[in-house]
């Protein structure tokens, strides 16, 4: 009986539930708690390049990306040292894979993540950014505009499609941090579905 109630109470996610991805337009504002319960707002970082990383420590794609040979192993720390603000956002609903303060604290420690992990348990922020997978990356320029939304790279599980690595997020950051336009606005993200 309990299982039936849980299934019935889980509302399906439809494409209409997600906001549009408006590249070149102001990024949706948000305020979310970090793992210590402190509120972090996008508005706090006005004038800086901001990266949003959709995060789920239970997702195999995220585990690989933060693992020894993964694209995210050192990327956040490296760019943070250059003044980029990096925020991981977990939009999973309570009780779903990779949620809860303890699971996220373990991942933060295990993967040497120095940046905040923010909890979006209602899924409102994830849907505003059309976040459908983990990992999914968003880059916001110093004017507050969303300039990229999509995949970390072209290499799910570290295997580049087409044979050659395209570190898309790295390319975008290299341009935007030098005052240049983003070389790419969108790409199709890969990974686990966000557990709304």
Image: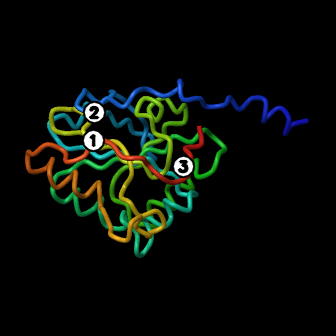
Q: What's the CA distance linking mark 1 and mark 2?
A: 6 Å
Q: How far apart are the two marked residues, 3 and 2, measured between alpha carbons?
A: 32 Å
* Side of 65 relative to 9 (left or right): left
Q: Earlier in the sequence, mark 1 or mark 3?
A: 3
User: Residue reaching furthest right?
Assistant: 1
Residue 35 image point, x, y percent = 46, 47
Mark 3 is surrounded, within 10 Å at the Cα level, by few (under 14), some (14 to 19) or many (20 or more) other residues, namely some
Q: Residue at x 17, y 41 (%)?
A: 48
Of labels 3 and 2, earlier in sequence is: 2
Outermost top residue: 16
From the viewer's side, name the closer residue of 68 and 40: 68
* Percent of width and height locating residue 72: 36, 63
Q: Is residue 7 left or right of residue 144?
A: right
Residue wearing tag 3:
101
Mark 1 packing: few (<14 Cα in 10 Å), some, or many (20+)? some
Q: Which residue is mark 1?
A: 185
Q: Which residue is mark 2?
A: 23
In the depicted view, which residue is nearer to us: 79 or 162?
A: 162
Residue at the spot 33% in from the left edge and 27% down from the top edge? 29
What is the secondary structure assignment of the residue under circle 3? helix
């Amino acid at each position: 009986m309990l299982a039936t109630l849980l299934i019935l109470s889980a509302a399906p996610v439809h494409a209409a539930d997600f906001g549009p991805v408006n590249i070149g337009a102001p990024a949706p504002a948000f305020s979310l708690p970090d793992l210590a319960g402190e509120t972090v707002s996008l508005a706090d970082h006005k004038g800086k390049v901001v990266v949003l990383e959709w995060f789920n420590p239970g997702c195999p794609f995220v585990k690989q990306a933060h693992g020894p040979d993964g694209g995210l192993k050192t990327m956040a720390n490296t760019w943070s040292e250059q003044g980029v603000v990096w925020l991981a956002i977990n939009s999973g609903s309570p009780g779903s894979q990779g949620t809860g303060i303890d699971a996220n604290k373990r991942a933060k420690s295990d993967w040497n993540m120095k940046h905040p992990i923010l909890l979006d348990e209602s899924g409102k922020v994830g849907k505003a950014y059309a976040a459908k997978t983990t990992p999914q990356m968003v880059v916001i320029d110093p004017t507050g505009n969303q300039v990229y939304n999509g995949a970390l790279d072209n290499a799910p599980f570290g295997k580049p499609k087409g044979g050659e690595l395209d570190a898309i997020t790295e390319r975008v950051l290299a341009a935007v941090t030098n005052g240049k336009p983003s070389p790419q606005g969108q790409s199709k993200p890969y990974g686990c579905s966000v557990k709304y």
